[in-house]
Image (cartoon, rainbow, N blue to C red):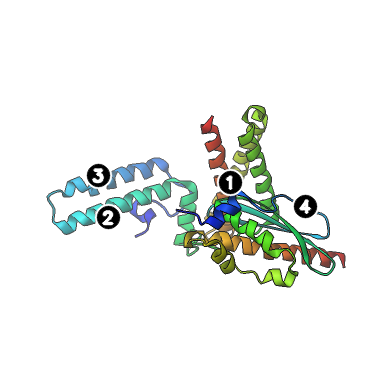
Amino acid sequence: MNYFELFQLPQRMELDAALLSQHYLQLQRRFHPDNFANASERDRRQSVQQAALINDAFQTLKHPLRRAEYLLQCRGIDLKHEQQSFQDPVFLMQQMELREQLAEIATAPEQTQVLQQQLEQELQQGQQQLHNELSQALEQQSETGNQQAASLLRKLKFFDKLQQELEFIEQQR
Amino acid sequence: MAYSNKVIDHYENPRNVGSFAKDDPTIATGMVGAPACGDVMRLQLKVNEQGVIEDARFKTYGCGSAIASSSLVTEWVKGKTLDEAQKITNTEIAQELALPPVKIHCSILAEDAIKAAIADYKQKQGAQG
């Protein structure tokens, strides 16, 4: 049973977050280890495993990037264990420039407020566009669409890293 | 996870950090990235008329192992011909730096950066010739 089936949700990128939470809470209640306190050792062990699986599944489906990665995994594309390096000079050049801006913001926060706002905006726009394209590619349900989605997801992971680092810098202030 | 002394040395004193003018015909630029960790690496080689690498520069945004791998590679490629540089493998890099299995992808990144740079150089030369 895959995570979508576990939560009785359609196997798609678009997801009803409220429904996910609702089904998560239902499952969590049902399989909570406390309910198995007087059960056999085997049943208790199973309930613990089941509770862990439900948590993993929830975290995976909740986060858009992890959801997309999981969806592709269900369709036979394993990005998680990919060791191959990514080679798109134009995209990587842009990432390099964004990284340089980030480094500048980190070293001189007082003088770089405008730059920081620009970077925030650029990251947001870049991610928004890639997310839209990703959803469309995944909706195609075709081999070409899946490969496109994989490529878009790789790019989103670079943006995600930048976003995390920017947030880290902001928290340090 | 503990880094080896060699990784720490390259991380604290990275060799040949910087850049060359990208549009210079004698400069080969290799850009590679690892989506899983978001690391980005740029390796540039200055190649003379005999096809020998005279100098190298790198810039890497990533973990200590990725920085050390690219720093090491800039030292290794100097004085080598492009064909010799092409033969450097990630296994050699990983062994030299004693990288743990989870960091092998950093050495793969450095190997791929060399190959990407050489491909860029050949494309540039082809476009000229």
Residue at mark 1 shares a chain with residue at mark 3: yes
Q: Nearer the viewer, mark 4 or mark 1?
A: 4
1 and 2 marks in contact (CB < 8 Å): no
Q: Nearer the viewer, residue A123 or A166?
A: A166
* Residue that sits furthest to the right in the current view: B129
Dot 4: what SS? loop
> In 3D space, how far apart are the residues under numbered discs 4 and 1 (Cα atoms)?
26 Å
4 and 2 marks in contact (CB < 8 Å): no
**Residue, disc 4:** B20
Q: Nearer the viewer, mark 1 or mark 3?
A: 1
Say few, some or many: other residues with alpha carbon within 10 Å of mark 4 (under 14 / 14 to 19 / 20 or more): some
Q: Looking at the image, is mark 1 or mark 2 earlier in the sequence?
A: 2
**Residue, disc 1:** A159
> In 3D space, how far apart are the residues under numbered discs 1 and 3 (Cα atoms)?
36 Å
3 and 4 marks in contact (CB < 8 Å): no
Q: Looking at the image, is mark 1 or mark 3 earlier in the sequence?
A: 3
Say few, some or many: other residues with alpha carbon within 10 Å of mark 3 (under 14 / 14 to 19 / 20 or more): few
> In 3D space, how far apart are the residues under numbered discs 4 and 2 (Cα atoms)?
55 Å
Dot 3: what SS? helix
3 and 2 marks in contact (CB < 8 Å): no
On the question of residue A34 being in view, the answer is yes
Q: Looking at the image, is mark 3 or mark 2 earlier in the sequence?
A: 3
**Residue, disc 3:** A29
Residue at mark 3 shares a chain with residue at mark 4: no
- Judging from the image, mark 2 belongs to the subunit labelled A
**Residue, disc 2:** A49
Dot 2: what SS? helix
Give amino acid for label 4.
Phe
> In 3D space, how far apart are the residues under numbered discs 3 and 4 (Cα atoms)?
60 Å
* Image position, residue B52 (x, y; %): 78, 67
